[in-house]
Amino acid sequence: MFLSTFEKQLDSKRRIVVPVEYRALTSGPFDGVFCYPSVEADCIEGGGQALFEAHKQAIDSLEFGDPIRTALETTVYGGLARLGFDTAGRITLPEILCAQFGLTDWVAVVGMGDRFQIWSRDAFHAHRAEQRLIAREGLASLRTAQRAARIGAGG
């Protein structure tokens, strides 16, 4: 699993060192990662062969011509970049993705289980604060529902 958050500085060539823990998880047909514009957030999303296969399976499950399939194909397949590791474990982020998400200096590389995201550091700090609020509210709602289910099952 891709875990934790790492803050990294892009160098002048838009390279970042991929955490060694992440490099170990990206087994696939080449020594690197797949990256593309995230479907759910304003950041780059990436992962190994398993993530690519999961997206392919989801896309293939939709009928040809379905507008959701087309949107996913455009975003994932059309935006996909295969980024190989250099000898120092770095990847070079595509200029178009850096421009799209404002990645110019410091970035946050965020583990998301089966994938990771690369954010502008400042944008991620704001996003993380929003996500904490959503998580707190969601957990409180879940606990309330679980209590109600236990009371209903016992009564």
Image: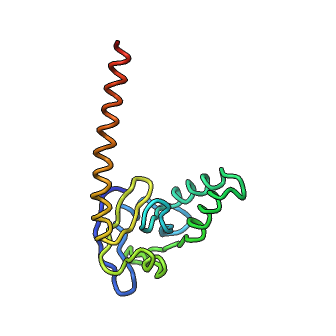
Q: Is residue 48 above or below residue 105?
A: above
Which residue is at 44% across, 54% downward?
A: 114
Q: Is residue 114 left or right of residue 59?
A: left
x, y percentage for residue 87? 40, 78
Q: Is residue 54 left or right of residue 143?
A: right
Relative to the observer, which residue lies in front, 141 or 94? 141
Relative to the observer, which residue lies in front, 17 or 131? 131
Quadrant (top left/top right/bottom left/bottom right) for the C terminus: top left
Model colouring = rainbow
Please state the total of marks drawn on the protein image. 0
x, y percentage for residue 45? 45, 64
x, y percentage for residue 139? 31, 40
Which residue is at 53% across, 68% downward?
A: 30
Which residue is at 33% across, 83% downward?
A: 11
Residue lying farthest to the right in this orientation: 64
Q: Is residue 62 above or below residue 91?
A: above
Which residue is at 31% across, 31% downward?
A: 144
Residue lying farthest to the top in this orientation: 155
Q: Is residue 68 left or right of residue 124?
A: right
Residue 73 placement: quadrant: bottom right
x, y percentage for residue 90? 39, 75
Q: Is residue 54 above or below residue 31?
A: above
